[in-house]
Amino acid sequence: MVQITVEAALGCSADAAWRAAHSPAAAAQLYRPLLQMRPRGSERFPAAFKTGSRIDVALRIFGAFPAGTQRIAIEDLVARGAGSQARTMRDAGRPLSGPLALISSWNHEITIIPAGPRSAVWRDELTIGGWFSPLAAAVLWPMWRWRALKLRRLAQGWA
């Protein structure tokens, strides 16, 4: 198993960050322009992801080159610990095709932690497994760092 974790201090409330974590539009913005994410076939993105949301997406590098498909499967997790205000959204989906489909296990969790009335911490944690995971991590590790940079910038508009 390989785990990639980044945290980003955001200039928006925890509620705004939580809404953004559930927004297909915000998810798509995190990867642009490197990756474009579109629903497969006749599917459409929901207005917001919620527990039970499940959608297959096609990924394209710079909008031109196929990069495979991925299943997004959302589950909101109950906060653990007395008085915990942290909220976690799990994407228990997985890559379906393309190079990342060589990963045998995939768990992506986004935890939003309040840090003040107008600030929050976004913890982005990806755990992958299988023989291909160390090679995939070499690509995903810098991508997760890039996501953190984009999160900080995008969060200014979420307030």
Image: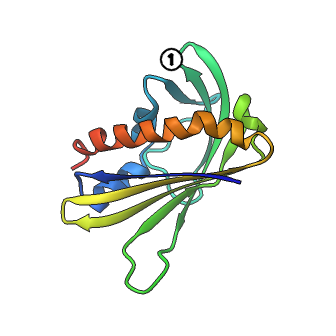
Q: How many marks?
A: 1
The x, y position of residue 2, in whole percent, is 66, 51
User: Which x, y percent locates residue 58?
Assistant: 62, 28
Question: Residue beneath label 1, please?
Answer: 62
Look at 56% across and 12% down and name the residue there. 64
Q: Which residue occupies 56% across, 58% down?
A: 90
Taking depth in this image into account, of 22 and 121 the one nearest to the observer is 121
Q: Secondary structure at mark 1?
A: loop
What colour scheme has been applied to the protein in the rendered image? rainbow
Residue 59 is situated, as x and y percent measured from the top left of the image, at 59, 27
Q: Residue furthest bottom?
A: 82
Q: Report the amino acid beneath label 1.
A: Phe
The crowding category of the residue bearing disc 1, from other C-alpha atoms within 10 Å (few below 14, some 14 to 19, many at least 20), is some
Q: Residue furthest top?
A: 64
* Drawn side of residue 11 relative to residue 112, left or right: left
**In the image, farthest residue toward the right:** 131
Compared with 36, 65 (above or below) is above
Residue 3 position in % (x across, y down): 61, 53
Choose top left, top right, bottom left or bottom right for residue 140: top right
Residues 69 and 30: in front is 30
Residue drawn where x is 40% and y is 70% of the image? 86
Q: Quadrant of the N terminus?
A: bottom right
- Left of 146 or right of it: where is 96? right
In this picture, residue 152 sits left or right of residue 108: left
Question: Is 117 placed above or below 74 here?
Answer: below
Q: Nearer the viewer, residue 50 or 90?
A: 90
